[in-house]
Structures are given as structure tokens and as C-alpha cells.
Amino acid sequence: MASTPPAAPSELQMIQRTHAVLELVAGRWSVDVVYLLAGGTRRYSEILYEVGEISKKTLTQTLRTLEAHGIVTRHAYPEVPVRVEYSLSPLGWSLTRLLMDIFEWSSELDQDRARARRPGLALAA
């Protein structure tokens, strides 16, 4: 018995899912933490130090949110004191590709804006 292909998502579903992802990455520190973890596994204290001006409470909330959405994995080692490390999950790695696409798009947008501000140069390009 052949299975039927899944129905294409409706425009409303696409809008809702896109908004859900944008809300996740729009968190003040989410992108910072994802980019930092793309550089490798980090302990909580390393993230706190390297990510910048963030409170411990806010970092904890950010990490918990990213973990709850499957972006970040948390590994606690049975040591005294407990050592906790964070890394990107496979889903987190796929998010880094999207973030890089957004960065590249923003770079192109900046170039287009610069050309638009200097119309004489745009013709020469």
C-alpha cells in the first residue's frame, strides 16, 4: 500500500511556524549563545564569561529555553561539584546554518543599501 505524500502546509501554518522560530531566536541572548556554542562545548561559567553582559538568571533562562526547544543539550557529570556542559544538538547545528544564511543575506542587503545611496556608483558596478 503506497502512502500519500503529506499535504503542503497552508500559508497560515507557514506563518505560524515561522513566527514561532523567530520568537525563539529573538530572545535577547539566544543568537549569542547559539553562535558561541557553535565554537564548541562550553561550561556554564565559560558561557557566562564569553557571551557578555548577561545576568546568571537570564543566562539560565536562555539555556533552559534553548534546551526545551531541542537547540542545546545539557550534560551534567556526576562529580562534586557537578560539572555541567552545554553544546548544540543536531537541531541547533541546523539553526546555525539558518543564522549564517541570515547573516549573508544581511551583508547583501547592506551592500544593496550602500549602492542605492550612491546611484552613480551602482551604474559602474
Image (tube, grey):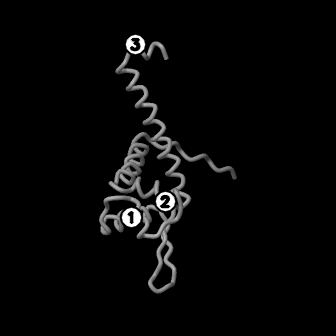
The kind of residue tagged 1 is Tyr
Name the residue furthest right. 1
Q: If you read the primary sequence from the N terminus, does the residue marked by circle 1 or circle 3 appear first? A: 1
Disc 2/disc 3 C-alpha distance (Å): 43 Å
Q: Which residue is mark 3?
A: 120
Residue 47: % across, % down: 42, 64
Image vertical order of residue 81 relative to residue 5, above or below = below
Q: Which residue is mark 2?
A: 37
Q: If you read the primary sequence from the N terminus, does the residue marked by circle 2 or circle 3 appear first? A: 2
The kind of residue tagged 2 is Leu
Residue 68: % across, % down: 42, 65
Q: If you read the primary sequence from the N terminus, does the residue marked by circle 2 or circle 1 appear first? A: 2
Disc 2/disc 1 C-alpha distance (Å): 13 Å
Residue at x-position 35% and y-position 58%: 52
Residue at x-position 46% and y-position 36%: 105
The answer to which image quadrant residue 90 occupies is: bottom right
